[in-house]
Image (cartoon, rainbow, N blue to C red):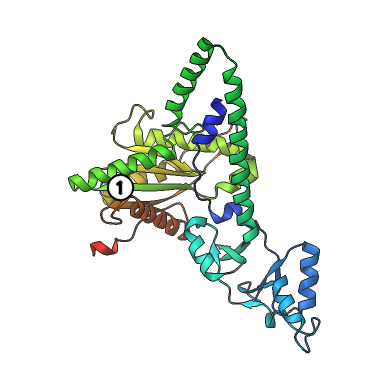
């Protein structure tokens, strides 16, 4: 029962593109013939390939659909026709560090089924509608599994006598109260609590005409930690990072903070958030630098005695300068974080000024 409650307490935060894309996209030179590219695709068992120029930059996308549309053309010869004459030219590219939710409107507008993914200017993979559908199917299956387990546990609870049932319900209620506040892995406040407090603090800030700053903190290249050391080690890094956050920002546990109105939370995955009421951008940048420097200089130990040092990128946004409500502040902090990662990571960027305030 408690396990089911913990699963339901986890928030569905939009993933980064790098987390769901098909890594290592198949590429082909634009000088190859259609027949040669089809051979490459068949060997790799893919339905699309990224066509690249001599310098490695993306020239286009060639899919099975492109071939089918040309096969009935008079005079079409797959062995003699270059793939550059058949491919979808000049496709859009998306960044691996962008959130899928922020890109979805653009993806729908473009109408592409396959989109090259770049990181630091280099091709790193491809996002296809199959990747997106796989994510949605996984979410649906997970939700269904949770509901089935919940029904099974409820049935078992009904077989207990009245006293045992009351004790179990009290225990579950106590656990629910804890889960309503904290993330089970790191012990920090969770996404749900952050969103509730953000709404409260925005309303307070608007009434009192005071500033409110939000920091998004993302561990740089966290996937490499998982790939090199395993997911268990990745969890240890998240817990170690949370401890650094506590010691740097709070000076103690979640329940014993220096400024009781500040919120330090796990936003989702390897991304964390700091909500700082009555704090302007300048002061928030000072806090952000304190966090960045502390993370960079503090090795995180593994259970086997090894250590790893990570860095973070931080986006800073302040109400009312960078946004006028919760959604605006979240979007501004997320955009600032994105620019910090694009600029090279291990740095801090504040959001651009909100247009309505210019």
Total numbered labels placed on residues in the image: 1
Residue 342: percent from left, percent from top: 47, 60
The N terminus: image quadrant: top right
Residue 293 horizontal side relative to residue 124, left or right: left
Q: Of residues 206 and 318, which is closer to you in this image?
A: 206
Residue 265: percent from left, percent from top: 41, 38
**Under tag 1, what secondary structure?**
strand
Up the image or down, 223 lies above or below 114; here it is above
The extreme left residue here reads 208
**In which quadrant of the rendered view does residue 208 lie?**
top left
Residue 232 horizontal side relative to residue 343, left or right: right
**In which quadrant of the rendered view does residue 51 lie?**
bottom right
What residue appears at the point 63 percent right and 43 percent down from the top-left corner? Answer: 141
**In which quadrant of the rendered view does residue 149 lie?**
top right
Residue 49 horizontal side relative to residue 150, left or right: right
Residue 309: percent from left, percent from top: 52, 42
What residue appears at the point 40 percent right and 48 percent down from the top-left corner? Answer: 216
The C terminus: image quadrant: bottom left
Label 1: how many Cα within 10 Å (few below 14, some 14–19, many 20+): many
Q: Of residues 281 and 65, which is closer to you in this image?
A: 65
Up the image or down, 261 lies above or below 159; here it is below
Residue pointed to by mark 1:
213
Residue 19 horizontal side relative to residue 242, left or right: right
Up the image or down, 125 lies above or below 77; here it is above
Residue 352: percent from left, percent from top: 33, 61
What residue appears at the point 28 percent right and 64 percent down from the top-left corner? Answer: 355
Q: Of residues 209 and 229, which is closer to you in this image?
A: 209
- Judge whether residue 303 can be spotted in this image: no
- Judge whether residue 334 can be spotted in this image: yes
């Amino acid at each position: 029962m408690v396990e089911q409650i913990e699963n339901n307490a986890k928030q569905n935060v939009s993933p980064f593109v790098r987390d769901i894309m098909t890594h290592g996209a198949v590429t082909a030179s634009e000088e190859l013939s259609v027949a040669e590219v089809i051979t490459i695709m068949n060997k790799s068992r893919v339905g699309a390939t990224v066509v690249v120029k001599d310098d490695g930059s993306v020239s286009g996308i060639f899919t099975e659909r492109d071939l089918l549309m040309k096969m009935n053309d008079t005079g079409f010869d797959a062995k003699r026709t270059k793939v550059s004459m058949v491919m979808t030219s000049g496709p859009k590219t998306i960044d691996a560090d962008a959130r899928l939710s922020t890109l979805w409107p653009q993806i729908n507008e473009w109408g592409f089924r396959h989109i090259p993914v770049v990181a630091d200017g280099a091709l790193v993979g491809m996002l296809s509608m199959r990747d997106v559908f796989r994510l949605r199917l996984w979410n649906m299956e997970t939700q269904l599994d949770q509901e089935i387990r919940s029904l099974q546990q409820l049935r078992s609870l009904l077989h207990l006598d009245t006293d045992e049932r009351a004790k179990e319900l009290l225990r579950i209620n106590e656990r629910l109260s804890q889960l309503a506040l904290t993330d089970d892995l790191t012990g920090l406040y969770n996404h749900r609590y952050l969103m509730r407090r953000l709404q409260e603090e925005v309303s307070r800030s608007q009434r009192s005409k005071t500033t409110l700053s939000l920091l998004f903190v993302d561990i740089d290249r966290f996937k490499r930690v998982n790939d090199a050391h395993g997911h268990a080690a990745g969890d240890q890094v998240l817990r170690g990072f949370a401890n650094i956050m506590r010691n740097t920002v709070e000076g103690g546990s979640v329940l014993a903070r220096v400024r009781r109105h500040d919120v330090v939370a796990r936003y989702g995955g390897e991304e964390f958030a700091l909500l700082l009421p009555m704090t302007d951008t300048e002061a928030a940048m000072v806090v952000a630098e304190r966090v960045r420097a502390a993370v960079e200089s503090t090795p995180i130990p593994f259970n086997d005695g090894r250590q790893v040092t990570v860095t973070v990128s931080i986006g800073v946004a302040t109400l009312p300068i960078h946004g006028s409500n919760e959604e605006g502040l979240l979007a501004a902090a997320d955009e600032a974080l994105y620019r910090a990662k694009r600029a090279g990571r291990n740095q801090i960027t504040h959001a651009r000024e909100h247009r309505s305030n210019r």
